[in-house]
């Protein structure tokens, strides 16, 4: 484990800026922490707690996955995603919105989901898990809120814990966490944590905005399972940072493989 | 201009398998070829020729942007994209299909377009441009077609030339090429060609990936220079090495273009 710490510290240092790493054991893996309590800009990783809250409300019967929505004009949002490029009358179900919010990080879908579930409800659910740093304070691309200093935050320790809860089916409950996990497994953007991993082991959500490059997810093989969050801010080079996240992820994966063998 | 040939050759040999690189000058850049005529499995990079044929048909007036299509409940083409996860009966337009095919590499949207456009006519358009290697023979994940030996093909030189043609509005012409370029600019997967480029670079591209095969092709522009580029790789051992090699080759070309543009501007 000392080797792993040394390697991750070297990779983190080479990025410059702030790098936080947290790994939580789900089965046959281990816990690892580096600067894990740092509260950092969430970018799109905030979409994971938003997904959890939406699925929780579906479980409670307050929302239906088949409910239909049409998002036009000002309901559409720039940045990542596909809905803003589709024709105005395109009809989407809540399940479509949840899927697009995660797998292509669709900002229009995310803003719709935030409105549907209520921002305060996302935060209450986070507090109920004991998280004090992670917070949803504004919609995507809400320039006015940003000017007022409102932003969305995550903490590596809290996100790794939330993801471990999902992997253990203890976030929303068995079949509901299966849905959360299934959506995250269909992720189209997995070239940070997933860059050096074999195919099919990762369910994740990336986040990028300004100098923030984040990725968090659940790694499952037939021998072990763990959650991992790697968050970076103010690093020197965007591309190199993404590669460094990939290398940190690979180092953790290899260490889990060695542990589960021995 | 600096000769990047030896460096490209070194990186290609380090990766292993077959690597092709083609660069076409659009403004203050240069032309470069490295095994550019090698015909390889297209993977999703075939979606550039399909996009070009799709906008060309718009120009012909035989179809319009809002021609309706509907998502079938049954057919859920595997692989990349979002439509396979959307509810059955979802209303879509011709433009939606083009956009999803390119920006999320949506295989279901692509197959709906191939059905409409037909492989023969997409290939015929490529032949008219003088491309002898690029070819659409089957839909994506068409296992029956694969068994019959049908496949889709590209060559780096032809894709780089096609991208240049789109940029210069010499593919489908005028507003139709502008639309194709705009859609490529919305690309959500810019990891390979874009990964190591400076913020100043604008990239409109379409990657492709399949077992032991990874490509990326598109247009790179800054205020000072512009070029189209296609890198194809095939037969390597390690996916992440291919990924990084494309990113590094892209950066090598970018830096050489940056130098040559500085010289051109005195």
Image (spheres, helix red, strand yellow):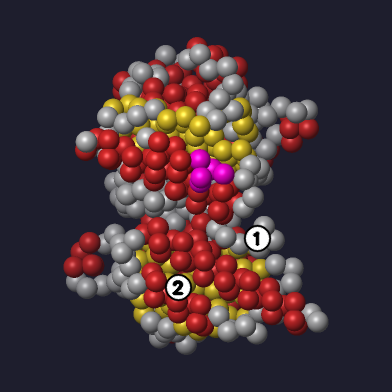
Q: Decide if residue A11 is on the left or right side of residue B118.
A: right
Majority SS type along the magenta span: helix
- Using residue A117 as the reference point, say whether residue A74 is left or right of it: right
Q: Nearer the viewer, residue B212 or B97?
A: B212
Q: Which residues are magenta?
A: A9-13
In front: label 1 or label 2? 2
Residue A14 horizontal/vertical position (percent): 56, 48
Q: Residue at x 47, y 53 (%)?
A: B104
Image height of A229 relative to B216, above or below: above
Q: Residue furthest left?
A: B147
- Which residue lies under the disc numbered 2? B11
What is the x, y in percent for residue B138?
Answer: 31, 68
Give the secondary structure at mark 2: helix
Q: Is label 1 on the same chain as label 2?
A: yes
Q: Residue at left 50%, top 32%? A: A34
Q: Quadrant of the C terminus of chain B?
A: bottom right
Residue at 68%, 29% in the rendered image: A151
- On the picture, is B198 further left or further right than A246? right
The residue lying toward the viewer, choosing from A215 and A175, is A215
Q: Quadrant of the N terminus of chain B?
A: bottom right
Sequence-wise, which precedes: disc 1 or disc 2? Answer: 2
Residue B265: give x, y in percent of width and height. Answer: 79, 80
- Chain under numbered label 1: B
At 54% from the left and 68% from the top, the residue drawn is B250
The percent position of residue A163, horizontal first and vertical second, equals 42, 28
Mark yes or no: residue B152 visible. no
Q: CA distance from mark 1 to mark 2?
A: 21 Å
Residue A116 image label: none
Give the image quarter of residue A32: top left
For disc 2, the chain is: B
For disc 1, the marked residue is B198
Vertical comparison of A175 with B63: above or below: above
């Amino acid at each position: 484990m000392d080797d792993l710490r040394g390697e991750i510290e070297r990779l983190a240092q080479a990025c410059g800026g702030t790098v936080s790493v947290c790994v939580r054991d789900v089965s046959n893996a281990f816990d690892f922490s580096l600067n894990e309590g740092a509260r950092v800009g969430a970018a799109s990783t905030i979409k994971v707690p938003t997904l959890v809250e939406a699925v929780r409300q579906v479980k409670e019967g307050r929302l239906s996955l088949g409910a239909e929505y049409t998002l036009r004009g000002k309901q559409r949002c720039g940045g990542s995603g596909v809905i803003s490029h589709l024709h105005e009358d395109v009809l989407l179900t809540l399940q479509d919105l949840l899927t697009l919010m995660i797998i292509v990080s669709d900002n229009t879908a995310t803003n719709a989901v935030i409105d549907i579930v209520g921002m305060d409800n996302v935060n209450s659910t986070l507090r109920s898990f004991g998280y004090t740093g992670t917070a949803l304070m504004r919609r995507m691309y809400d320039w006015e809120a940003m000017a007022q200093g409102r932003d969305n935050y995550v903490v590596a320790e809290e996100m790794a814990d939330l993801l471990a809860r999902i992997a253990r089916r203890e976030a929303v409950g068995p079949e509901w966490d299966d849905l959360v996990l299934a959506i995250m497994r269909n992720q189209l953007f997995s070239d940070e944590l997933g860059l050096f991993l074999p195919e099919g082991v990762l369910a994740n959500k990336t986040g990028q905005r300004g100098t923030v490059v984040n990725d968090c997810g659940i790694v499952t093989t037939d021998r072990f399972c763990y959650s991992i969050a790697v968050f970076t801010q103010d690093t020197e080079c965007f591309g190199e940072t993404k590669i460094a996240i990939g290398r940190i992820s690979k180092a953790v994966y290899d260490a889990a493989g060695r542990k589960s063998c021995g | 201009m600096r000769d990047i040939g030896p460096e490209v050759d070194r990186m290609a040999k380090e990766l292993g398998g077959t690597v092709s690189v083609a660069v076409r000058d659009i403004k203050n850049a240069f032309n470069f070829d490295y095994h550019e005529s090698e015909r390889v499995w297209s993977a999703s990079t075939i979606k550039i020729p399909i996009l070009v044929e799709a906008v060309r048909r718009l120009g012909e007036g035989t179809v319009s942007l809002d021609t309706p299509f509907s998502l079938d409940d049954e057919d859920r083409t595997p692989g990349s994209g979002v439509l396979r996860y959307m509810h059955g009966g979802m209303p879509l337009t011709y433009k939606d299909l083009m956009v999803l095919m390119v920006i999320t590499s949506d295989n279901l949207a692509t197959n709906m377009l191939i059905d409409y456009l037909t492989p023969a006519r997409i290939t015929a358009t490529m032949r008219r441009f003088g491309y002898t290697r690029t070819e659409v023979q089957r839909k994506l994940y068409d296992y029956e077609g694969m068994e019959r030996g049908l496949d889709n093909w590209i060559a780096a030189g032809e894709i780089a030339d096609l991208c240049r043609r789109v940029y210069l509005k010499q593919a489908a012409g005028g507003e139709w090429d502008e639309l194709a370029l705009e859609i490529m600019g919305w690309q959500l997967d810019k990891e390979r060609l874009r990964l190591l480029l400076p913020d100043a670079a604008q990239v409109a591209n379409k990657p492709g990936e399949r077992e032991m095969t990874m490509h990326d092709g598109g247009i790179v522009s800054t205020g000072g220079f512009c070029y189209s580029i296609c890198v194809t790789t095939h037969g390597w051992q390690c996916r992440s090495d291919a990924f990084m090699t494309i990113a590094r080759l892209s950066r090598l070309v970018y830096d050489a273009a940056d130098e040559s543009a500085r010289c051109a501007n005195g």
